[in-house]
Image: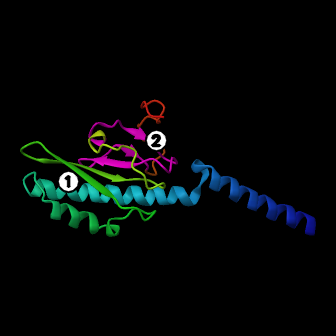
Amino acid sequence: MRASSTCTLFAIIAIAVVSQSCDRLNVWGRQKQIDSYSRVSAIAKLLENRRKKAGGVLSESDVNAAVKSIGNGLDAWGHEIRVFSEFDGETNAFVVVSPGRDGKLEFVNPEAYFASSRVDIRGLLDRDIVFRNGLCVTNAGKGPDSGFPPPSQAGLP
């Protein structure tokens, strides 16, 4: 009886260690990604709604207030959620970004986020979570089929 209990305990520990090292099986990390995705989504939708009500333009202080109003402006890993804005003469365009688990933005130039392709990053915990003008660019949500291509099909490494 003791030998089987020891083997069972060893198996549970081994599974936990392996799942932590493999992002797609990392339940705790995946939950943080889902929570971060929800925060970025909520900020993006809030900015889009406020932008429409304001006639297309939001001040920097309005943007900062909206970001801070959700999760104090932090993703579930404790990293600052960033907002990049472009102005075309009439309206603001917004990109809302969580840098993912590693806390590093994927693009040095924020303009690249305005042109980035749609991609499914579920379980790829270091990837940036990106919403552009209220719409999801990098899917990290819970849905079983997002219609988003995996990184390899989207031309990403």
- Marks 2 and 1, Cα distance to the nearest angstrom? 25 Å
Q: Looking at the image, is mark 2 or mark 1 earlier in the sequence? A: 1
Q: Residue at x 51, y 46 (%)?
A: 124
x, y percentage for residue 23? 58, 50
Horizontal side, residue 29 vs residue 58: left or right: right
- For disc 2, the marked residue is 145
Residue 65 visible, this orientation: yes
Residue 131 in magenta?
A: yes
Q: Which disc, if any, is residue 48?
A: 1
Magenta highlight range? 113-140
Quadrant containing the N terminus is: bottom right
Q: Residue at x 18, y 56 (%)?
A: 49
Amino acid marked by disc 1: Glu
**Rendered image coloring scheme:** rainbow
x, y percentage for residue 11? 79, 58
x, y percentage for residue 19? 65, 54
Image quadrant where residue 98 sits: bottom left
How would you rate the neighbour count of disc 2 (Cα within 10 Å): few for under 14, some for 14-19, many for 20 or more? few
Q: Residue furthest front?
A: 108
Amino acid marked by disc 2: Asp
Nearer to the camera, 47 or 99: 99
Horizontal side, residue 81 vs residue 56: left or right: right
Image quadrant where residue 154 sits: top left
Q: Residue at x 21, y 57 (%)?
A: 47
Figure disc tally: 2
How would you rate the neighbour count of disc 1 (Cα within 10 Å): few for under 14, some for 14-19, many for 20 or more? many
Residue 24 in magenta?
A: no
Residue 1 visible, this orientation: no
Q: Which disc, if any, is residue 141?
A: none
Secondary structure of the residue carrying tag 2 is loop
Horizontal side, residue 30 vs residue 46: left or right: right
